[in-house]
Structure formats: structure tokens, C-alpha cells
């Protein structure tokens, strides 16, 4: 695997060290039962909404960038502005301004929006990770979600309540959950706490568990899909509302998608009454030889297979790309091509021209 993902450090907590059984993930979930409230109902027969994540720095510096989201998207969400480090540079501060601006701009232009994310391992501010006392950590988490979800209440369709909580390689002895500051400090109960608090703070928002590597063929991906299903069931067993699973969809175009496994996964979620959406699609092409033509052909194949698997399980609630144009993407920063060519991760090229896979995706959403 490329070096993108934060390596899992040593796992120290017995609660995360057990096998992949339904009961093993979230010991105390039942004690945290929240009322299962109403949630925004999935849309009717209209096309599946297409969305993309936007970045406020380029929104300000590049007017053509902002405009293309208005031209192409049904949903626009802040990529980084709702994450802990941007929102809470200090414990006292809640910097809602940057996300407010993007969300209100999207909504005033007839778009919907969504929230990403309350709980993540990446980039937590130092003041947060200095906390060692579980009671204090729980207070901070509850307050963070109450204030943030409360502030945006009614303006966001859904929230990624927790992001990337599944272990990168769950078959290792360390256990099914990722070793994070949240897990080390609060234990697995940080997940049900987050869902309970989110349900209280914005009863109308759909609550999502979001994760990556849920679409490829192979034992590690089977294990990750299994852990996700276990996690959802355990939250439900605890009386908590989980509305959907977000498959991020960072698609390595030299990997093989497993459409049958994706279909089974989507059906299993449906049986549990849980929806599905693709939340962060982009194509990682650093292992694909050739020029733009070959790179885009490989992208079209991996996106097509991904959409086949996604739609085969159940109708997705939305399909979202992580950015919109090759002008700006994390992929080139973290996984550049070794041949010196720019990466081509997104549905529009750097000149804002749609690629074939954008057309393929739009056709697919329209036919759903
Ligand atoms: O694309 C995002 C990049 O601009 C940020 O610097 C980075 C750290 O906040 O996060 C990137 O987005 C990640 C997303 O939040 C979760 N899934 C993986 C995405 C790519 O790393």
C-alpha cells in the first residue's frame, strides 16, 4: 500500500484487541441509547445527487473554481473547514466562520451541503491530544458535537459523525478499531457517544459512519467491510441511529474493485435499514503508466466498476467527489507520479473540462 495512511501505532487497549465479533467493538453502547429520532428521508425518484468538496482558500483565490461547483453540483461541502484543527485552534474557540460562508453560499445557490467530520485521528490540535483524563475527553467530545452540530442544525443534510475509525488492517492482532487518541483516551465508547450526541444536537441530519478501502477485492477489504457491518449493528444494538455508511472511494486505478462484495455490503446495510453514499471519490493514478489518455482510461474503468458495485447493493443517497478539478487535490501532494506528469484525480481536468468518467458518472446518477 502507498504511504498515505497514518500507520497504526501499537494498540494498547484490551477493548480493541478482541476478535471481529459483533459484541467486540463497542462494549458500552447499550448504556448510551439515544432516542431513535426522525431523520431526513432519502430522496424519491429524482437523479441521485452529485456533490463535491470545496476548499475555502481556492474559493477565495480562484473565481472560476467557485463557479464550477455552482455549474456542476447538487451538493457542495466544506472539505476541511469543519475538522477539529480548523474549527478548534484553541479549546475555547469555535471558528464557524469559514464553514458558515461555504455552507451558506452553497445553500443560497440552491445546493445542499453536509458535515465532515466530528471525530478523526488526523491533525487533532495539540491542546486536545494533551488531555489524558477520559472524563475530560468525553466532556470535550460531547461539547464539540453539541456546539458544532447545533450551530449548523437544519443546514446540513448529513454528518460524518466518525471518520476512519476502522483499523487500516483489521486482521492484525491489534483489533478492529484504529489506534487513535480517541480510542486510547476514551475507549471504543467514543463512537456511540458521538452518535448519541449528534442525534440530539441535529435530529434532522442523517448520521453517517465514513471510511475508506471498502470497495477493493481481497481479504483485507473483506475484513474492513465486515468490521463496518459489525460496527453499525452494535450501534443499533445500543439503540443508536445510524442512517448511512459513507464509502470514501479513494480509488487506486491499479487496484481491482470487487463489485460483488460491494453489492453484498450494500444489501446487508439495506437489510439493517442503513443507507449508503460515496463521500470522497477521486482517482489515485501514480501506478498507471502512460500519458493522460491511458491515465484517464484506467480512471474510467475503476470509477465504472465502483459505480457498478455501489448501485448494485442499494440506491446511493449521494455520490460525492473529493474536489472537482485536477487544479487542486491532496493526491498530487501525497502520492505524486514518479514520471513528473501531474496527477489526474478528479472529474474535471485542470482546465475545468469534464473527463469521460464525469459523463459516465452523471449518466449513472440520472438513471438510478
Ligand atoms: O483533502 C484533504 C486535505 O486538503 C487536508 O489537508 C487533509 C487533512 O485535513 O485531509 C484531506 O481529506 C481527507 C479526508 O478528510 C478524509 N479522508 C481522506 C482525505 C484525503 O487525505
Image (spheres, rainbow, N blue to C red):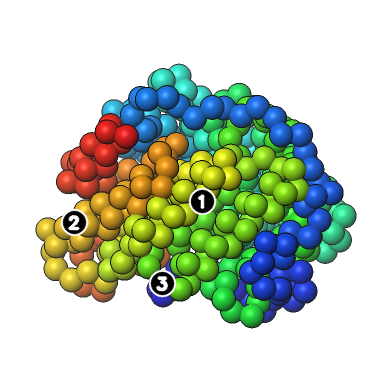
**Residue 97 spot, x, y in % from top left:** 59, 32
Q: As rendered, which of 207 and 285 lies closer to the eye?
A: 207
Q: CA distance from mark 1 to mark 3?
A: 18 Å
Q: Could you tell me if the residues under marks 1 and 3 are in contact, i.e. CB atoms within 8 Å?
A: no
Q: Position of residue 190 (x, y in %)?
A: 74, 54
Q: Is residue 267 visible?
A: yes
Cα distance in 3D space between marks 2 and 1: 32 Å
CA–CA distance in space, label 2 to label 3: 24 Å
**Nearer to the camera, 306 or 267:** 267
* Badge 1 element: helix
Residue lying at the far front in this picture: please name it.
Answer: 271
- The reply, left or right, for residue 322 in relation to residue 273 is left
Question: Mark 3 = which residue?
Answer: 218
Picture residue at 58% right of the left edge, 35% below the top: 206
Q: Which of the labelled discs sits on residue 296, or is there none?
A: 2
Point out the image quarter for the C terminus: top left
Q: Residue at x 81, y 46 (%)?
A: 32
Disc 1: which residue:
268
Depicted 200 relative to depicted 320: above or below: above
Q: Secondary structure at mark 2?
A: helix
Is the residue indicated by label 1 positioned so its CB lies within 8 Å of ligand 1?
Answer: no
Amino acid at each position: 500500500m502507498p504511504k498515505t495512511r497514518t500507520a497504526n501505532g501499537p494498540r494498547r487497549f484490551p477493548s480493541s484487541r478482541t476478535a471481529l465479533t459483533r459484541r467486540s467493538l463497542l462494549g458500552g453502547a447499550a448504556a448510551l441509547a439515544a432516542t431513535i429520532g426522525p431523520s431526513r428521508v432519502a430522496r424519491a425518484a429524482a437523479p441521485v445527487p452529485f456533490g463535491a468538496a470545496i476548499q475555502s482558500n481556492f474559493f477565495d483565490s480562484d473565481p472560476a473554481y467557485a463557479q464550477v461547483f455552482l455549474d456542476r453540483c447538487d451538493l457542495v461541502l466544506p472539505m476541511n473547514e469543519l475538522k477539529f484543527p480548523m474549527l478548534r485552534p484553541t479549546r475555547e474557540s469555535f471558528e464557524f466562520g469559514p464553514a458558515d460562508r461555504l455552507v451558506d453560499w452553497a445553500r443560497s445557490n440552491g445546493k445542499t451541503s453536509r458535515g465532515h467530520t466530528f471525530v478523526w485521528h488526523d491533525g487533532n490540535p495539540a491542546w486536545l491530544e494533551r488531555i489524558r483524563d477520559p472524563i475530560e475527553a468525553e466532556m470535550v467530545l460531547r461539547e464539540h458535537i453539541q456546539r458544532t452540530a447545533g450551530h449548523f442544525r437544519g443546514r446540513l443534510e448529513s454528518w460524518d459523525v466518525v471518520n476512519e475509525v476502522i483499523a487500516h488492517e483489521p486482521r492484525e492482532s491489534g483489533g478492529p478499531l484504529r489506534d487513535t487518541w480517541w480510542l486510547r483516551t476514551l475507549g471504543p465508547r467514543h463512537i456511540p457517544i458521538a452518535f448519541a450526541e449528534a442525534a440530539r444536537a441535529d435530529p434532522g441530519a442523517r448520521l453517517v459512519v465514513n471510511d475508506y478501502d471498502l470497495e477493493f477485492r481481497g481479504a483485507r477489504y473483506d475484513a474492513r467491510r465486515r468490521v463496518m457491518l459489525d460496527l453499525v449493528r452494535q450501534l443499533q444494538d445500543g439503540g443508536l441511529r445510524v442512517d448511512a455508511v459513507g464509502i470514501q472511494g479513494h480509488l487506486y486505478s491499479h487496484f481491482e474493485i470487487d463489485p460483488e462484495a460491494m453489492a453484498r455490503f450494500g444489501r446487508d446495510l439495506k437489510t439493517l435499514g442503513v443507507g449508503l453514499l460515496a463521500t470522497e471519490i477521486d482517482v489515485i493514478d501514480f501506478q498507471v503508466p502512460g500519458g493522460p489518455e491511458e491515465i484517464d482510461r484506467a480512471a474510467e474503468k475503476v470509477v465504472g466498476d465502483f459505480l457498478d458495485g455501489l448501485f448494485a447493493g442499494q440506491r446511493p443517497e449521494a455520490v460525492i467527489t473529493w474536489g472537482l478539478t485536477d487544479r487542486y487535490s491532496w493526491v498530487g501532494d501525497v502520492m505524486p507520479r514518479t514520471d513528473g506528469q501531474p496527477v489526474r484525480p478528479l472529474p474535471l481536468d485542470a482546465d475545468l473540462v469534464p473527463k469521460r468518467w464525469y459523463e459516465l458518472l452523471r449518466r449513472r446518477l440520472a438513471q438510478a
